[in-house]
Image (cartoon, rainbow, N blue to C red):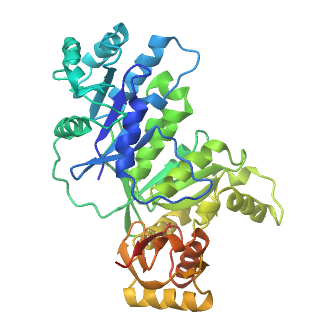
Amino acid sequence: MTLPTVAIIGRPNVGKSTIFNRIAGDRISIVEDTPGVTRDRIYSHGEWLGKSFAMIDTGGIEISDAPFMEQIKSQAEIAIDEADVIIFMVSGKEGLTSEDEQVAKILYRSDKPVVLAVNKVDNPEKRDDIYDFYALGFGDPYPISGVHGLGLGDLLDQVIASFPEETEQEPDDSIHFSIIGRPNVGKSSMVNALLGEDRVIVSNVAGTTRDAIDTHFTADGTDFTMIDTAGIRKRGKVYENTERYSVMRAMKAIDDSDVALFVINAEEGIREQDKKVAGYAHEAGRGVIIVVNKWDTLKKDNHTQQDFENVIRDEFQYLSYAPIIFVSAKTKQRIEKLPALIKQVNENHKRRIQSSALNDVIMDAVAIHPTPTVSGKRLRIYYATQVAVGPPTFVIFVNDPELMHFSYQRFLDNQIRDHFDFTGTPIRIIKRNRK
């Protein structure tokens, strides 16, 4: 299910990122403190009254060497393009400005609902000072304080009330996957190679993202839906000139996927941009397959593949569970193996383990490697159970969660993987006090 998207826009220094972080911070519940996992804070999630939504923080968007108003215009264009609802943020401290009016003029041309938020109204007695903002033409302004968190409830009530109506959709049992990676790694060629097989039946179905068509096809009797990431290359100069926008689009594709095919260019090797996209796929809990494309272009010896794999494992230690496949979209080398591998990873991503079998593994692990003692107090593990799939998530009940060091948690993670096939999927372990 595609989440509605909320964009926060406005001129600089009105507090967009503060509000973004407040809303996102209330939503984030399972966090892994894993080195190397980075997420560009331009895109995240929020939740209010049981409704989840994606968020774009245009405060994180910077277009260098552009005039001041050109930056504001670009921010507004991105918000209009991506969002279902726009939070237009102004500053109650500085009052109505000509820049606010310029942003408003851009938003008038959109068909998107706009909710006007007046930030920095820290003193309730100053709320009468917001009436000037009615002149912007977006209805009632909502006074808020990002610093103190005041007024956010009323603002979010209006935001979720402005979401598009949910429509009944036919059940879709196909495996949803996306092909992600930085520009010029060969994603388009891989799409064509996957869909060009004689045994593949191709049909276009309406996509879940604007200006995109998700592609449905059948391979070896299994239905697949390939999430369109072609939008990365759309929208002219705004998207062409800034890699951050391609990251944002890739994040949306990942959120709509069960499995992400993370593509690396064998010719160019690993770049910093690769780590951002891969890190988000891991954080989002999606199944991941590392696909090294353009493998046909390298001069190889008996050690080339193993050496390349060692580099990948070293650079992406948090993706140690992800299988690696070396392919060539141009020559179709090993492309035919991808559907079966996607299916396998998807099955592992949704795998559920019986509590009795899980607890046998946990107790055997404790017998092999006794629980640690911290300040004279020993960690005691009482019981474990699986609470979710996609990714598989386990709760372990203990006497004190603070006593379980990250290294011991990783040991339990490895023991679970040794006994059950979770190739291609992250697993989550949550520590809880038995009481």
Res 357 quadrant in image: bottom left
The x and y percentages for residue 45 are 37, 46
Q: Residue at x 50, y 48 (%)?
A: 192
- Report the front residue among 101 and 212: 101
The x and y percentages for residue 73 are 41, 17
Please indicate, yes or no, whether residue 216 appears anywhere in the rendered image. Answer: yes
Q: Residue at x 19, y 15 (%)?
A: 131
Q: Is residue 262 above or below residue 378?
A: above
Q: Residue at x 59, y 62 (%)?
A: 319
Image check: 122 left or right of 278? Answer: left
| Tag count | 0
Question: Which quadrant: the C terminus?
Answer: bottom left
The x and y percentages for residue 15 are 40, 28
Res 102 quadrant in image: top left
- Report the front residue among 74 and 396: 396
Q: Residue at x 30, y 64 (%)?
A: 173
- Report the front residue among 152 and 341: 152
